[in-house]
Amino acid sequence: MKLATYKNDSRDGQLMMVSRDLGVACAIPDIALTLQYALDHWQDLEPALKARYTALNERKVEHDTFDQTRCASPLPRAYQWADGSAYVNHVELVRRARGAEMPQSFWTDPLMYQGGSDDFIGPKDDIILPSDDWGVDFEAEVAVVTDDVPMQCSSEDAAARIRLIMLVNDVSLRGLIPGELAKGFGFFQAKPASSFSPVAVTPDELGSAWQDGKVHLPLRSTYNGKLFGKPEAGEDMTFSFAQLISHAAKSRNLGAGCIIGSGTVSNKQGTEHGSAVEEGGVGYSCLAELRMIETIRDGKLATPFMQFGDRIRIEMCDPAGTTIFGEIDQQLKPFKT
Amino acid sequence: MKLATYKNDSRDGQLMMVSRDLGVACAIPDIALTLQYALDHWQDLEPALKARYTALNERKVEHDTFDQTRCASPLPRAYQWADGSAYVNHVELVRRARGAEMPQSFWTDPLMYQGGSDDFIGPKDDIILPSDDWGVDFEAEVAVVTDDVPMQCSSEDAAARIRLIMLVNDVSLRGLIPGELAKGFGFFQAKPASSFSPVAVTPDELGSAWQDGKVHLPLRSTYNGKLFGKPEAGEDMTFSFAQLISHAAKSRNLGAGCIIGSGTVSNKQGTEHGSAVEEGGVGYSCLAELRMIETIRDGKLATPFMQFGDRIRIEMCDPAGTTIFGEIDQQLKPFKT
């Protein structure tokens, strides 16, 4: 099943069902007006949702051309956004670039931060920030949306509670991170509003690419019109989504509609620090990783962070080259009061 | 205006209007079914809410006795819960107890962490946890609920965007904090579900006790039936709520219904480390602070963290001794699968 949210005059937008090929879409007000409502009542609504999806794919219900430019993030606001850092290779690189050892426990105990979830921006919305001196970076990730998850849920049980999968651009302000993390309470100002792919899909839509709680497909990041990264999201993902959910639920319940992120997708590529697309590698999912490699390998930085006007596009295609989630495509622009 | 949420069979409960004396309450389905809905449409609904409140206080609308035991937290789930640490005295004590210097910048740059907001527990609900070996502590705090707040909002503008005030028990797992903070990404497992006072009130309800974006009244914590703390919440609060909101909005918008906490209320009491209620002081708002003082002053700990069966009650009264928000009153109990 594929779902999206069109912007309207409400805070939560209008839930849309989207055909498998992203060709057409229809509103389903008789089933659910918003995605959060559908998630709140998933068990009850699932049969009706599935039936309508079949009909839509056969063009047997009234529909219009699906318009990604009308999309908000599938959940324009959510009750939880918790982002893991499951590609431990990426974490090790970050540490090495600043001369720090990574604790061995990072390979067994997931890193996760609590993100702001009250005001996501849409997949085609500009990234609006007061300054491009803050080290603005994109982070291409995969995320899942959960059903209710009880405290102490095991990884095994968590797997069955994944309702939807989508892509994320977890915008980060690298210049604000060191000062903020030094204070000891984690990220806050360093993590402005994230955006999610136009379409969220149920795991079955991925077929055999969804295995062991990981998405085994390349995540493509295109920066200013040039392919920047295409790492395989299922590779080098040390913790599956099921493990990340179980980690999050150690001491609390997670409510339906909770979004759990994978962290920046990164492949080790069998080398010490991977390589760029133009060098025949799979490239990177954020500017910081390339900059870390420049620091470690070359001793100096060549790639600046995002400046006003820069553009990032994030997408994932099936083996036939067809987009699954639609595209996140955003330009950095200055905030004006 | 005073508002509460009764539990019902929905996730967001039923919005209730409560009389000033907390004597009676009425549902207001013709105005708003849930508190989040009221906050989403506050400007439009405020006149109707005010008129109904006047009528309720005069017992001119249908009503029932207000029953705190039926209450969920005013927002049973929220899109944002960001907790400041505005009583810098408290932060300095924490650091000193573990032999660490506090950076001078902490007096000018607020500490704030992003909390989980998808599954708050009610003010009379048990605190359910799998273990009481995790250093379970209460933290008595004040919190505000905001209207929409635009990015880069100044403290001056932020003050007018405070819609409601309530009390919080920000349960903390002290045993999990050092390991989690050492990982660098802030709190996650160390912060289980928080609970909020039965009643949320508009700032005008506090009269002259609401000044400069601070609540100038004592916050009473009663632990296992014995008064444990009564610090004045307006004293030693280094950052006002307006300043905390402005801090939170540096790089993002805050959506209506965002909850911003004060952090554990703590008075310096003109001494190096304050004193307990039984010593004639105002006492403390969490066990950790007393334990820190025991460590610094006595060189050894005398007070354990909460064990299963322990009970914490948090409330705030006006100068005449009348409860303003109702009481948070919770017992720690074991999680059973």
Image (cartoon, coloured by chain):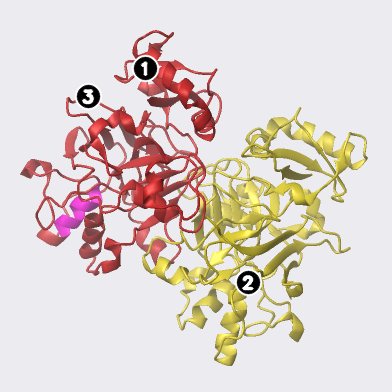
Chain colours: A yellow, B red
Give the labeled residue for mark 1: B66
Disc number placed over residue A286 in the picture, else none:
2
**Structural distance between the alpha carbons of marks 2 and 1:** 54 Å
Circle 3 — which element? loop
State yes or no: discs 3 and 1 in contact (Cβ < 8 Å): no
Residue A261: image location, x then y, percent: 60, 57
* Label 2 chain ID: A
Identify the residue shown where x is 41% and y is 61%. B180
Residue B128 falls in image quadrant: top left
Residue A303 in the image: x percent, y percent?
Answer: 62, 81
Question: Which image quarter is the N terminus of chain A in?
Answer: top right
Q: Residues within 10 Å of mark 2 (few under 14, many from 20)?
A: many
- Kindly indicate whether the residues beneath marks 2 and 1 are on one polypeptide chain: no
The residue identified by callout 3 is: B322
Main secondary structure type of the part rendered in magenta: helix
Q: Measuring 73% from the left and 48% from the top, which residue is drawn there?
A: A71
Q: Is residue A234 visible?
A: no
Magenta-colored span:
B286-295
**Which SS class for mark 2?**
loop
Q: Is residue A115 left or right of residue A2?
A: left
Chain under disc 3 = B
Q: Residues within 10 Å of mark 3 (few under 14, many from 20)?
A: few
Distance between mark 3 and mark 1 Cα atoms = 15 Å
In-image side of A100 versus A49 (left or right): left
